[in-house]
Amino acid sequence: MIAHSCRGHFRGGRYGFDTAGAPAGFANITRDDANDGNSAQPITNCNIRDESDKFSLTYYQKDSTTAYATPVSAANRLFTHRVVVTITVESKNPNSEFGGQMFSTMTSSVNLHNIGQ
């Protein structure tokens, strides 16, 4: 299970990495729009491997080259200017006719605006 380093707040919601209900070795990415810890809904289909390189959030300072250690402290959140999200999913039902197990990695850089710093 990935620790707190894979949680982040975006647009009032909270994203997480959750192994509950997933087959052994797999997990879901969840989103909790209410940000109350009780309303998390999966946004994947149990097709994220329970490995640290399959889902990550990396927080960057204003210079955009220095990453904060995770979990990011409340004080450092005030100075976070960019978050890089990386998710790797794999096909739920591999098909040998089309190459077997397929993987897809998405990396996106979120530039935060209106943070006042």
Image (cartoon, rainbow, N blue to C red):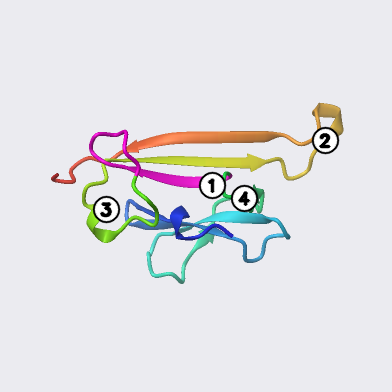
Report helix, strand or loop for mark 4: loop
Report how far apart the C-alphas of labels 1 and 4 lie in the structure. 8 Å
Specify the amino acid type for callout 2: Asn
Identify the residue under disc 1. Answer: 55
Quadrant where the N terminus lies?
bottom right
Magenta-highlighted residues: 54-67
N-terminal-most mark, 4 or 2: 4
**Residue at position x 63%, y 53% from top?**
50
Instruction: Please name whichever residue, 69 or 86, is drawn nearer the observer in this view of the structure.
Output: 69
**In which quadrant is the C terminus drawn?**
top left
* Whether residue 39 is situated above or below residue 28 in the rendered picture: below
Q: What residue sits 54% from the left and 52% below the top? A: 43
- The amino acid type, in three-letter code, at marker 3 is Arg
- The CA span between labels 4 and 3 is 25 Å
Residue linked to disc 4: 51
Which badge, 3 or 1, comes first in the chain's sequence? 1
Q: Quadrant of residue 28?
A: bottom right
Residue visible at 72% across and 34% down in the picture: 102
Is 4 included in the stretch rendered in magenta? Answer: no
